[in-house]
Image (tube, grey):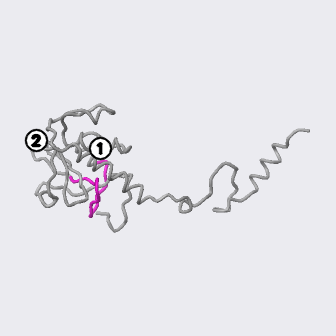
Amino acid sequence: MSFDWVGLLKSLLQTPSPMTGAPSIGGTCSVPISSTGYNREVDEAAVRARIVAFMLSQLGKPYKLGVEITPGKEAWASEWDCSELVEAAYRLARHVMPDGARFQFAATQPIRSPKPGDLFFLWSDKLNYIGHVMAATGRGTVVHAVGGRGVVEDPMSMWEYHARGRGWRRHVDFARPREDMA
């Protein structure tokens, strides 16, 4: 006796999905994400904490414009520039961030209220484009790599209203509630 594969397939195609009512084929998951125990806010907070923790662990290291750190070698980096520090922190948290402050600006979305790991950008009059990036720590400060100072933590108030400031922005992988859209 042979197995009736055609009959099985027909019965599966005639079985409606409990979520959508549309036919479904076995092997797919039709469970609401809320019933899985996954919590996006908790997951995002953990990612943000990893980004900030890495950046803060680099405090005191010297600045070098244009430095490039090989992926996987971040823990051994001896110097940083602003965008490479941000790129590495996001990479270690498994999020893609381009190199260069102006490209990071373009890859993020404007927001009103920063959370840890959100980025603040400064315009460069010399370059005539975005020339500097820093990240919110979640404790009223920002961390960034600055020429002549190295990797430092400054009060947010020192930069938020700076004449060259171009505002807070958020990585596209992070939630951006409607009320926080700038």
Q: Quadrant of the N terminus?
A: top right
The numbered mark at residue 152 is: none
Judged from this view, the residue extending furthest toward the left is 148
At x 79%, y 50%, the residue is: 10
Q: In this view, does 88 lie above or below 118?
A: above
Mark 1 falls on what kind of element?
helix
Q: How crowded is mark 2: few (under 14 residues within 10 Å), some or many (20 or more)?
A: few
Q: Position of residue 114 (x, y in %)?
A: 27, 60
Residue 131 falls in which quadrant of the image?
Answer: top left
Q: Position of residue 169 (x, y in %)?
A: 27, 55
Q: Which amino acid type is shown beneath numbered disc 2?
A: Gly
Q: Is residue 14 above or below residue 95?
A: below
Q: Position of residue 112 (x, y in %)?
A: 26, 64
Mark 2 falls on what kind of element?
loop
Q: Where is residue 139 in the image (x, y as percent from the top left)?
A: 22, 60
**What span is colored magenta in the figure?**
106-120
Q: 127 or 66, which lies in front?
A: 66
Residue 159 falls in which quadrant of the image?
Answer: bottom left
Q: How far apart are marks 2 and 1 (CA)?
A: 19 Å
Point out the frontmost of discs 2 and 1. 1
Q: In this view, does 104 lie above or below 77?
A: below
Q: 8 or 130, which lies in front?
A: 8
Residue 117 part of the magenta segment? yes
Residue 115 part of the magenta segment? yes
Q: Which amino acid type is shown beneath numbered disc 1?
A: Ala
The numbered mark at residue 89 is: 1
The numbered mark at residue 147 is: 2
- The answer to whether the residues at label 2 and label 1 have Cβ atoms under 8 Å apart is no
